[in-house]
Image: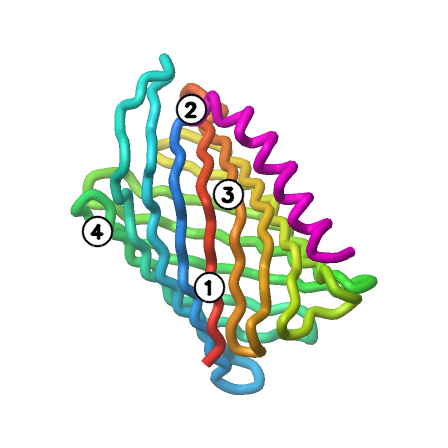
Amino acid sequence: MNIKKGIYFLFLFFLSSSIWAQGTDHLGAIPSLNMNKKVDEKWSMNTKVESRVIYKSVNPQGDIIKKYSHELSDLTFIMSRSIGLSSRISAGYMLRLEEGEIQQRFIQQYTLIQTKNGYRLAHRIVTDQTISPSEKPEYRARYRVSAEIPLNGKSLDTKEFYVRANNEYLNSVQNKQYDLEIRLVPLLGYVFSDKIKLEAGLDYRINSFLAKQTEQDFWFSINIFVEY
């Protein structure tokens, strides 16, 4: 597999997404900066800064109800401990600013990483609890599987491209109401050095299957990862 095949894969996904987007509820971007630090042989720390910007929102009738706006900003801290050669447990805290309101989220996470035939498969199970001044607490359970495939050879080296695809299922309970959200995120990444890499692609989300009318969101995702 090479860079042309990776770009072709993303092009097909974006082309099909442009058709789906006719029923989009939100269209926007999610830029993020991830800073990772290895504390010692077992412990590591991640600090993540993320924002969500809406370019367009529509109502069920297809009318535009909101154009460009900044929806929210997140600041997340996560401490992780290795519990084996391929797994780790984590705990963290997130502070969210949304429409002038501050929300808090407490995070618990388990990650298992497998390497097979030149690609990496990561399984992540997360539970979290969100506290908001104006809403009831929200409790969520998430499962994500992520595949990372180098586009040059069987290992990922510097100055090389790779493809990463995430599929996530997010269950939530709030005010005794259950809901499900499904996320599909294809990304094209590039390794600048052993300290810096960048990923960009589409974050497609479909939710509110049970609680209300189904919603579709399309976000342009761009992620910078820094090891320090």
* Label 2 or label 3, whichever comes before in sequence order: 3
Q: Which residues are magenta?
A: 1-24
Q: Amino acid at mark 1?
A: Ile
CA–CA distance in space, label 4 to label 2: 24 Å
Q: Amino acid at mark 3?
A: Asp
CA–CA distance in space, label 2 to label 1: 34 Å
> Which mark, by number, is residue 211?
2
Instruction: Check if mark 2's residue and mark 1's residue have beta carbons within 8 Å.
Output: no
* Label 4 or label 2, whichever comes before in sequence order: 4
CA–CA distance in space, label 2 to label 3: 22 Å
Q: Nearer the viewer, mark 2 or mark 1?
A: 1
Q: Residue lying furthest right in this view?
A: 117
Badge 1 element: strand
* Label 4 or label 3, whichever comes before in sequence order: 4
Which residue corresponds to the image point at 50% horizontal and 36% vertical from the top-left?
205
Q: Residue lying furthest top in this view?
A: 61
Q: Nearer the viewer, mark 4 or mark 1?
A: 1
User: Is residue 10 within the magenta segment?
Assistant: yes
CA–CA distance in space, label 3 to label 1: 15 Å
Quarter of the rendering occupied by the C terminus: bottom left
> Which mark, by number, is residue 102?
4
Q: Nearer the viewer, mark 2 or mark 3?
A: 3
Pointer 1: what residue? 224
Instruction: Check if mark 4's residue and mark 2's residue have beta carbons within 8 Å.
Output: no
Q: Nearer the viewer, residue 101 or 210?
A: 101
> Which mark, by number, is residue 203?
3
Residue 164 is drawn in which quadrant?
bottom right
* Label 4 or label 1, whichever comes before in sequence order: 4
